[in-house]
Amino acid sequence: MARPGLTPVTTLERSTTVKLKSLTAAAALLLGLTACSSADGSGSGEANADGTPRELRIAYQLIPNGDLIVKDRGWLEEALPDTEITWSRFDSGGDVNTAILAGSVDIGLAGSSPVARGLSAPLDIAYKVPWIFDVIGENEALVARDASSVAELKGKKIAAPFASTTHYSLLAALQDAGLKEDDVTLVDLEPQDIQAAWTRGDIDAAYVWTPVLGELQKDGRTLVTSRDLAAKGRVTADLAVVRTAFADRYPEALAVWLRQQDRAVKLVREDKAAASAAVGRQLGLSPEEAGRQIDQLILLDGEEQQGAGHLGTAAAPGALAQTLRSTAEFLRTQKTVDAVPELTVFQQALAADALAEAFGG
Amino acid sequence: MSRAFVLRAGGVLALLALWWAASAAGIWPEVFVPKPESVWSSLVETWTDGYAGHPLWEHLGVSLRRILLGSLYGVLGGVVAGLLIGLVPTVRALLGPLVTFVRTLPPLAYFSLLVIWFGIDETPKVVLLFVAALPPVAVATADAVRGVHEDYVHAARSLGATRRQIPFLIVLPSALPELMTGIRVAVGVAYTTVVAAETVNGVPGIGGMIRDAQRYNQSDVVVLGLLVIGASGLLIDALLQLAERRLAPWRGRA
């Protein structure tokens, strides 16, 4: 290794200095890069001359609700022609939380579990809930191979995608049936793996959503659905979240967004065929199957969103705040949040004022 | 020794100081850059109370068991495949491209197939690690076997060794140094693959723990998991290097 003209010691010293220098340079570059990206994220981007945002970044998920209709029909692009709208597909609310924290998404879809977690410590994400995409009904259910009640699942192997709404619903259903977590074997699997494991007979039951749910129901028995749990006060829902900075800076754009969602819900009620076709195109399903899946969800229009059972009004925050808080309490027992915030924190996170601006009331 | 040691310790301390400074400056939320002290307290907590219902040592132990089994099968299979590829031209033509093909496959890409074939328990994980660990050993063995000095073989033959004895008494021992390097690479590959293997029903397991923590945005546990994987990987590599020096002490002195 010794080079001509240099003693070994000098070589070592030289290469060390070079290494140190390049290391420092790399570290400085890294710091600079992260600083840039975080500076971008904390602001709300540039505005157009007419006050509309220059860009609107949306995180959507493949759930047969109004969001897919808005996307399929291009209504948002039509209503905000000067805004560049990007739709990014996400598979879980946890990832949407991360994206909003990183400042790379303005409006996203996340289940009530991830949102309760996002509003609690340690995440404390600065976002608000301006809209309920859907209240989860029969599209999420607990299916078992040979059991006729939840209590019979004692000692069995049950799968669910952890950190999702079904994970919450599964544990709630077990609790209601008098079972503890230790009484069963819980397996963390993504929906497609649940289907594989079910076909092979590796699991006895699973709490999962469509379309995998449909496959399980072909040879399994539905023990409880999220609609049943909602009736007992264990509500799960798919919620919209908007970065507080975005909502404060562009209230008109948010109102436009809300009105498109309202239009989609009304389309489902007034022209089911058109709505099913739009959702079917987005999910790669036939209109009939898409229509059946839409019916499993409970959709709410702008006026219903302002009801006391949901988002409510600025003066009287709706029951969703309590739902989120009980979800957070439950997550606390799972040790996935550090502390459960006061009810007022969740009430303030309901963007009822944005609803009022969009629909009056 | 002292100079190298000071440099190493200095490097680790400098990185720690940089980390501490970056997190203490508070430029980013804790989810982006967890504080060293929260990683420490999550170490204490996962060691005593556990994470996702299992203590840290159990997560690590289960993962190490998977790595050990996968590497063991991988090394056995790799030695056999490497010997055949190196010694039998027909097998070389048949298996050579296949081994290279498998080596370039990203584990996550075919893991879903293994889940469908072998279920969600230990089998698909060990099979994945086996498939990942086999090619480096096979390639190293094949190369080493073909590089064995012909004089050794001729000498053994003229001293009366049979055709069957040659591979085991002459070829393998003289290929041992390269084989040990292949094993070290294989264990390293198995180590990086275990996180992929634990994406499906991976708890307990250190990769499953990281994945779970990532989903709940518990960055301190993610960092802890990475540190544990890195530290245990260093330790295992050091053990393998020690074994290499014991088993093939002539290495580099020929």
Image (cartoon, coloured by chain):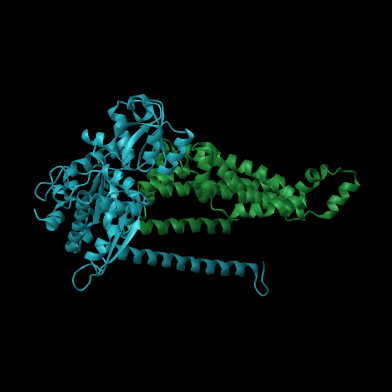
Chain colours: A cyan, B green
> For this view, does B251 lie left or right of residue B236?
right
Quarter in which the N terminus of chain B is drawn: bottom right
**Residue B5 image offset from top left, x and y in percent:** 56, 55
Q: Residue at x 16, y 48 (%)?
A: A305
Q: Is residue B237 visible?
A: no
> For this view, does A69 lie left or right of residue A182?
left
- Residue B48, by quadrant, is top left
A260 is higher (above) or lower (below) than B133 = below
Nearer the observer, A172 or A132: A132
Q: Residue at x 31, y 65 (%)?
A: A40
How many numbered discs sit on the rendered protein? Answer: 0
In the image as oriented, which residue stretches furthest toward the bottom? Answer: A5
Nearer the observer, B210 or A15: B210
A293 is higher (above) or lower (below) than B15 = above
**Residue B81 image offset from top left, x and y in percent:** 70, 47
Nearer the observer, A357 or B158: A357
**Residue A206 image offset from top left, x and y in percent:** 38, 35
- Residue A216, by quadrant, is top left
Quarter in which the C terminus of chain B is drawn: bottom right
Q: Residue at x 51, y 46 (%)?
A: B111
Q: Is residue A64 visible?
A: yes
**Residue B113 image offset from top left, x and y in percent:** 52, 45
